[in-house]
Amino acid sequence: MTIDLRSDTITKPTPEMLTAMCEAEVGDDVWGDDPTVKALEAKAAEQFGVEAALFCASGTMTNQIAIRALTQPNDQVICDQLAHIYNYEGGGIASNALLSVRLVTGERGKIAPQQVVENINPDDIHFPVTRLVALENTVNKGGGNYYTIKEIEAIWEVCQQHQLKLHLDGARLFNALVETGDSPKDYGKYFDTISLCLSKGLGCPVGSVLLGTDETIKKARRIRKVMGGGWRQAGFLAAAGIYALDHHVTRLKEDHQRAKEVGKLLQATSFIKKVFPVDTNIVVGEVVEDLQIPEVVATLAAQDIKVSTFGRRYIRLVTHLHFDDEALTTLATRLKKLTLPVAS
Ligand SMILES: *Cc1c(COP(=O)(O)O)cnc(C)c1O
């Protein structure tokens, strides 16, 4: 059995999800004719208490569309240096929205309200106009740590005071919600736009949803078309999303419990110096100085354990729908017999 913990995106639809997909009623979504896409959009909007939603192909697409919809060319966006929108979206902020980025160094990717205040440009023609703050919850590169709604409210207040828009990259927002018990409607209240991924822990094959006002989503739909993201009988994919929202949210808690176990197992190995606190479904471990990342990854791969990396010192393991208790036991057995040659 391959233990694939590279990402929570590697999951395949369960038989029940596949059935829901096959039974979907579909139409041409570019023509506004797909009832299942409309049902997914309505369901997500309702859950978060917002006016509208837009079903898109990826989280990168929903983030990029949102950033463009909320800004003007030459504006500036404030985000943490670990942000996905900055690190992992191919520099799209520059080409899709024509923005510059003001990076701040938060606490494992979490920004404090004061950092927003300190990074707002003065009203002076030399400086780009600070227009948008973008947060990420949970923080991928921070190791799956999360904001509470109280922390978000404080940032929202600063944004209100300074007329800044607020976007959330909520690729794994449901992982945060099952830990905090915070209400999706509060999120809907504080953010101008929210991007949710269905293809991560929720186990869908494809898809993200963008949430916002009627006006913003109308604009977003236009931008999606320009990006080539208008799609036809997308209801087959939307049906997976509806199924996931109904059946795969509360079970995320299991992923978090297993991630904690994975963290303990990793900490007990000879090749990991330190494991980040495990808050949700992401486990990040710092490799001991004597070893190089490729060696560690290859040794694990030889045991049929797949992991991903963050930079040159960290490995990342993400738990998901297919990583059950049996897989955890198998992982434990394989890790225990694994000895990496540590140079003395
Ligand atoms: C995965 C991810 C995205 C979007 O990814 P896609 O692969 O484009 O769907 C955005 N933000 C974060 C934090 C992510 O982990």
Image (spheres, rainbow, N blue to C red):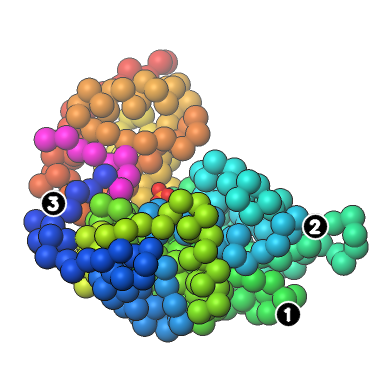
Left or right, residue 192 beside residue 283:
right
Secondary structure mostly seen in the magenta stretch: loop
Q: Earlier in the sequence, mark 3 or mark 1?
A: 1
Could you tell me the amino acid type at mark 3? Asp
Q: Is residue 257 magenta?
A: no
Could you tell me the amino acid type at mark 2? Pro
Asked whether the beta carbons under mark 1 and mark 2 sit within 8 Å of each other, the answer is no
Quadrant where the C terminus is found in the figure? top left
Tell me the SS state at disc 3. Answer: helix
In front here: 10 or 125? Answer: 125
| Residue annotated with mark 3 | 325
Q: Quadrant of residue 23?
A: bottom left
| Image location of residue 231, percent across then percent down | 36, 57
| Image location of residue 85, percent across then percent down | 55, 51
Label 3 or label 2, whichever lies nearer to me, is 2
Left or right, residue 94 beside residue 202:
right
Please rate how many residues cluster around mark 1, counting C-alpha atoms within 10 Å: few if below 14, some from 14 to 19, many from 20: few
Structural distance between the alpha carbons of marks 3 and 1: 48 Å
In front here: 44 or 224? Answer: 224
Q: Identify which residue is drawn at 28% across, 23% down.
A: 299
Q: Quadrant of residue 3?
A: top left
Please rate how many residues cluster around mark 2, counting C-alpha atoms within 10 Å: few if below 14, some from 14 to 19, many from 20: some
| Residue annotated with mark 2 | 128
Residue 87 circle label: none
| Residue annotated with mark 1 | 161
Query: Which segment is the magenta one?
Result: 1-9
Asked whether the beta carbons under mark 3 and mark 1 sit within 8 Å of each other, the answer is no
Q: Is residue 179 visible?
A: no
Structural distance between the alpha carbons of marks 1 and 2: 19 Å
Q: Identify which residue is drawn at 42% across, 26% down.
A: 293
| Image location of residue 201, percent across then percent down | 29, 57
